[in-house]
Amino acid sequence: MHNRKSSRRDFIKYSLSAILALNFGCSIKGLLRDGQHKAAIIYGTKYGATRDTAAWIKNGIGNNVDLLDVETLDFEKAVSAYNYFIVGSGIWIDGVHRRLKDFLSSESVNMHKKVIAAFVVCGSRDTTEGGRKRIKRYLNQIHKPLGYKPELSGYFGGRVIVEQLTEKDREALIKFYRKFLKQELKSWDRTDQKKAVSFGKKLQHLVEAYSLNV
């Protein structure tokens, strides 16, 4: 008899716990869905690989984040409209997208601790010491104007389609490939949808945590 009562009490206790947990989870999604705590991915791209990567990251996070192209971004309006940001850039010969660096530098005070993650899309790989150093240097170009390192940083493979390059860019890359890589320029694609979505899923937890503390 005693065991039956204990089992009933345990059942009620666990049922209440499950209901409370469900309500807690729903309250988080409700906050994000109602727009009380807004997140945005701000990206800088040249030929589209970073735009695609940003969209995949958004898919991993869910529908609670907006995609903003830094080329068409109104800096002041964006900072006032969103509570926190994920920022990312493609990498070219001169490094991180110039307008993204301008945005981070000009709004660093207003954006203090608002950037919760950063990423770069580049041709370097993390399988060599030199590649890892270059990736770190690219991410530092985002971290430095912010004045701090966001909680999560990542890198993704980029893409080069020779036929889509401007004449100026194609000539610059041909020289770079011949001088530093000792090979001829050719098209390649190392974008990774699965990796980007996985990064977004990690960010989902950060988005939810920050939503509760804004």
Image: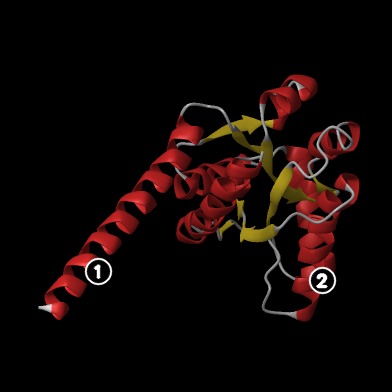
Identify the mark nearer the N-term, 1 or 2: 1
Expressed as whole percent of the image width and height from the top left, the position of residue 17 reads 34, 58
**What's the residue at 56%, 61% (across, down)?**
190
Q: Is residue 165 left or right of residue 34?
A: right
- Using a 10 Å C-alpha cutoff, classify the residue at mark 1 as few (fewer than 14 neighbours), some (14 to 19) or many (20 or more): few
State the residue position of label 2: 133
Q: Is residue 107 visible?
A: yes
Quadrant of the image occupied by residue 86: top right
Q: CA distance from mark 1 to mark 2?
A: 55 Å
Query: What amino acid type is highlighted by mark number 1?
Result: Asp
**On the rendered image, what quadrant is the N terminus found in?**
bottom left
Q: Helix or strand or loop: what does disc 2 sit on?
A: helix
Relative to the observer, which residue lies in front, 134 or 35?
35
Q: Is residue 163 visible from the viewing direction of this image?
A: no
Q: Residue at x 79, y 57 (%)?
A: 139
* Residue at mark 1: 10
Q: Nearer the viewer, mark 1 or mark 2?
A: 1
**In this image, 18 relative to 211: left or right?**
left
Residue 163, located in which quarter of the rendered image? top right
